[in-house]
Amino acid sequence: MPLVSSLMVSVLVEPLEERGLPRARWVEGLGLDEHALDPNGLIEWDAAMRLVDRAAEHLGGPEGLESLTFSLQAQRFGVGPAVGIVIRPQRLYQMIGRWMTDHASLPLRTRVEVRGERVTVDLSLAEGVRSSQALWYGLRGMFRRIPVELGASEPQVLSTVGDREARFDITVARPGLGTRIRRSFATIGGSRRLIAEFQNQQLELRRRLDELRNQSHALRASEARN
């Protein structure tokens, strides 16, 4: 069973508590404790999907989870309106697509295609891992939120969702004149610095996750020998 970053569920802790689901009750009966919600830890993909399903159930269904993820503030991830001056939302979709597979090691096959103001995100689950309809709705809320956090209008997001795959067709609103002018004065070096900073943060996350995986594998091997 793949181990993934607990960040994918830990970001939901506070908003779920605000909506009446404390962390102790969120993990109750799932064979987990609250350490599974440590943002710097690892969690088995199957357990993460069970948490996602329980969150959606508490919120009245997958659409409730979409509303919750749309409400998340991306400053948690170091993203805000200032970033939108030098990085177009289309570019951020590409960066997040790579983050999900390359750095958070989610068992997803990801393809992001950009054509002008339109972005197509294709996601499919790896063979043999647990699926969750609520997962796709949660991601849809996040995809709707990205341009808003960059100071732009909410995009149009059309989705086609299956059991193990989903396609999101995203149309990003053309930026206003003021944003275009600010971008024109933003230096290429500034853009490169922001992208490099984001990438360095993700590389550090990947390094920590690899260390935790190695420790987990060593512990399991030791337990098997004993």
Image (cartoon, grey):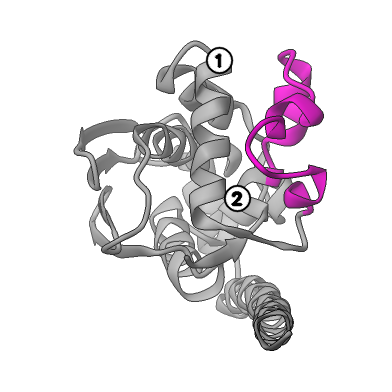
Task: Decide which of 16, 95 is in the foreground and name it.
Answer: 16
* Residue on which disc 2 sits: 8
* Residue on which disc 1 sits: 59
At label 1, the amino acid type is Leu
Mark 1 secondary-structure assignment? loop
- Residue under the point 31% across and 63% down: 110
Q: Quadrant of residue 62?
A: top left
178 in the magenta segment: no
| Residue 75 to residue 114: above or below | above
Precedes in sequence: disc 2 or disc 1: 2
Mark 2 secondary-structure assignment? helix
Describe residue 26's horizontal placement relative to residue 183 as left or right. right
Q: Give percent across and percent down for residue 136.
A: 36, 38
- Residue under the point 49% across and 39% down: 142
Q: Quadrant of the C terminus?
A: bottom right
- Residue at far front of view: 226
Which residue range is magenta in the image?
10-38
Describe residue 112's horizontal placement relative to residue 140 as left or right. left
C-alpha span from label 2 to label 1? 17 Å
- Residue under the point 63% across and 73% down: 202
Task: Decide which of 195, 23 is in the foreground and name it.
Answer: 23
Q: Give percent across and percent down for residue 165.
A: 23, 48
Does the residue at mark 2 contact the one at mark 1 (Cβ under 8 Å)?
no
